Amino acid sequence: MPKPVHLVWFKRDLRVDDHGPLHHAAQAGPILPLYIVEPGYWELPDTSRRHWDFIRASLLELDQALSDLGRSLVVREGSAVEVLQQLLDEIPVAAVYSHQETGNRWTYDRDRAVARLLRDRGVPWREYRQHGVVRGLRNRDGWASQWEDLMRERPFGAPGALAAGPAVAGGVDRLPQAPAGVAADAAIDLQSPGLQAGRRVVREFLRERAEHYAGGISSPARAWTASSRLSPHLAYGTVSLRRVLQASRERQREVGAPRGLDRRQAAWKRSLRQFEERLHWHCHFMQKLEDAPDIEFQNLHRACDGLREDAFDEHRFRAWQDGLTGYPLVDAGMRALRDHGWINFRMRAMVVAFASYHLWLHWRRPAQHLARMFTDYEPGIHYSQMQMQSGTTGINALRIYNPVKQSLDQDPDGVFIRQWVPELARVPGDWIHQPWKMTEGLQRESGCRIGHDYPLPVVDHEHAARLARERFKSVRGTGASRQETAGIHQRHGSRRRPSARTPGRTRQARTRDQMDLFPDPDP
């Protein structure tokens, strides 16, 4: 009778370093590392080929890393319950090990089904935290402290030689080029996936690029290098959030104390602190979905129910989706996202706000489209942010970005616009942000006829913004709405006090953070 194996189920944690389940399973005895390709998951409207391409390449590297430790990755295709049941019938399993997952409703239901199976078969399922998310949380009191405690713990190193269990069929040669049912996707310039790429991005950002983080992440052009670009690696776990945070703090110590720093050192220090703050917010937003999984489908602030749902305009939605709204920065952002799978946070917030307020689209279908487009789709962050930028949380100010002002502020010379909206490449700088105001003569000279080569604005943005404010004012002004808002803040609002060390913090900015607004400049 073979010795029972300790099955490590890899999910959104495709690494061997700082991997709690792998560490504990390796200490317990022979292990079986497993990845399950789940066709049902890849048929969902918030999954896409670009997600799979990143995952598949990362799995190939994971297999090599495990093989170097003495045990290759086992790959099976099917529902998790069916695959695990087959393995339990094939070999003795002492326990199943995995990280806790805060995913969409489908993965939540799948995990509940797996839990029932393992309970019925008498097999323990040992789940470990890899983020600051707390299961069964009643309110946010003390949440920041527990996050800090977890992030300060010593990371698990990669295990030594792994004790191999019985031979089991299935290896990475079973990884499909594309899972059955996955939505077709245009070929994109995919960000480099895998364990080695993740470590390289951490190193390059903290050593070479982070200096420009604080001043560069709002610009749609400069953010491509000023941002960390770690988001897909954190989403699929090719790097550990704890490793990233600790490496960032080590870099801060190298830079030195705030006083006495020269100008460049001060920029490094300020940027690294802002980056660390956003690592905290990463888990903060994931906690919202963990606590209220229904926000994937329904408004967090139920007073908003019925506000937009019955007014969905297909023509406006398609124009937004295809980058043909007539607002150059919005269209440039949507096209860049389509071709690269990434845009910076300010652009993400603006395209969602534009769809929600100016086009008056209920957030659910735009959320699914953006989920498919974002290579770094992280459900906990995604649905929390969709609701926040759409005004349906009840605890955030309405952030109705002016698409013309944002264009002037964030892309003043039209560099980003001309790159992604080539129809406007020859439009003079004075008109690049509002090309519909060009005379017929200027349109002929620039080779861009508005309404023919590039669309007229799909809406009047000023009128649409006023109308949106009036509609939300009528919803938010009732006593029942304010009472519901208080309950939402008690359950989901941040308790973390902004750092007193952060220079230039105004009372208003500190209040914004306490009210749970993402630390980003006002529109």
Image: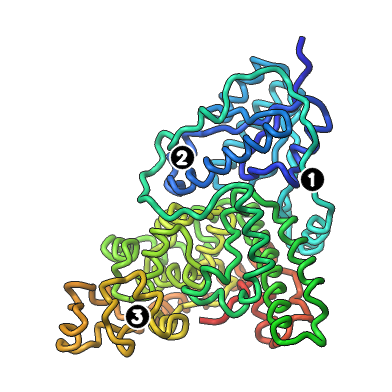
Whole-percent x, y for residue 232 in the image: 56, 54
**Disc 1 to disc 3, C-alpha distance:** 53 Å
**Disc 3 to disc 2, C-alpha distance:** 37 Å
Task: Please report the residue visible at 83 percent of the width from the left and 29 percent of the height from the top.
Answer: 28
For this view, does 22 lie left or right of residue 318? right
Q: Which residue is mark 1?
A: 157
496 vs 228, nearest the viewer: 228
Crowding at mark 1 (Cα within 10 Å: few <14, some 14-19, many 20+): few
61 vs 442, nearest the viewer: 61
Q: Which residue is mark 3?
A: 461
Disc on res. 51: none
Q: Secondary structure at mark 1?
A: loop
Q: Which residue is mark 2?
A: 42
Of tags 3 and 2, which is closer to the observer? Answer: 2
Of tags 1 and 3, which is closer to the observer? Answer: 1
In the rendered view, tell whether residue 128 sits above or below residue 6. below
Q: Amino acid under label 1?
A: Gly
Would you identify the image quadrant in which residue 394 lies? bottom right
For this view, does 40 lie left or right of residue 186? right
Whole-percent x, y for residue 501 in the image: 78, 81
* Circles 1, 2 touching at the beta carbon (< 8 Å): no
Q: Amino acid under label 2?
A: Trp
* Circles 1, 3 touching at the beta carbon (< 8 Å): no
**Disc 1 to disc 2, C-alpha distance:** 32 Å
